[in-house]
Image (cartoon, rainbow, N blue to C red):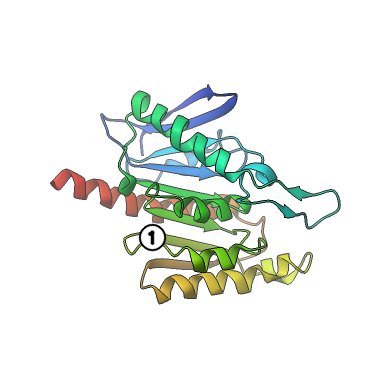
Amino acid sequence: MKGHVERFQLEDRFCACLVPEGTGPFPVVCLCGWRLEDRLAVLGESLPPVALLFVTAEGDRDFTPWPAPGIREGERFLGEGEKYLRFLREAALPYGTRQFFFSSRWEERAILGYSLGGLFALWAQRQGRLFQAAGSLSGSLWYPGWMDYLRGHPPRKEESIYLSLGDREELGGPPLLRTVGDCTRQAYEFYRSLELDTVLEWNKGGHGKGVESRWKKALAWAAARVAHGAEGSAEK
């Protein structure tokens, strides 16, 4: 995809987006991770014309949907995901729509996240008609209370979900982290039981191996979903 990177600041948050060439409106994928502002062009190089939006975050605070004890000494999950989502919904996405021709249709929006960002992405999809597609890359689905929340807040039939995990992620670390494999499998089976468009992809290695490759695979999946939504709206 040919495009250019725009950097801007809103409400004391640094943001960056990859904007495709053309006139729009462009389907958009929100990326919830770390230090992605300098990788947007690389991540988008093989994609169809979709905008990529990145907003800086502190994972323990911004990507956690409710407070929980930390898993390591001195760690604490603050559970301020609602504030981060509100910023995306009320500030970053509307700004992108005005300035860079992002689509405002929920069917043409996706959200992907890595680690705690993956947990946040799946949770954000449940907060109203915001994102047709959501992806959890090596997501922290071990998070206390998440599986009960998921079962009590099932996705809509027209939504799509992508899950990926490294095949060694459940083999090490604190006991809670080692439940990530079982939690991911359970989430996949739950989504499939609802006959949703769901993918579970296994990658080689642990949590930090081949991260860019995992992003590219998830982005290709997400772009296909939201670009399809854009084609549908064009036909109308």
- The correct choice, above or below, for 173 with respect to 58 in the image is below
Q: Residues within 10 Å of mark 1 (few under 14, many from 20)?
A: many
Q: Residue at x 68, y 71 (%)?
A: 179
Left or right: where 207 falls relative to 83: right
Residue occupying image coordinates x 77% and y 49%: 76
Which of the pair 184/167 is nearer the observer?
Answer: 184
Name above or below for residue 185 compared with residue 62: below
Amino acid beneath label 1: Ser
Residue 159 image position (x, y, % from top left): 36, 59
How many dots with numbers? Answer: 1
Q: Residue 4: x percent and y percent? A: 41, 28
Percent from the top left, x then y, of residue 210? Answer: 60, 55
Depicted 168 relative to depicted 38: above or below: below
Front-lying residue, 200 or 158: 158
| x then y, percent, for residue 222 | 40, 53
- Would residue 203 be visible to someone looking at this image? no
> 216 or 141, which is in the foreground?
141
Q: Residue at x 51, y 23 (%)?
A: 8
Local SS, label 1: strand
Residue underneath mark 1: 160
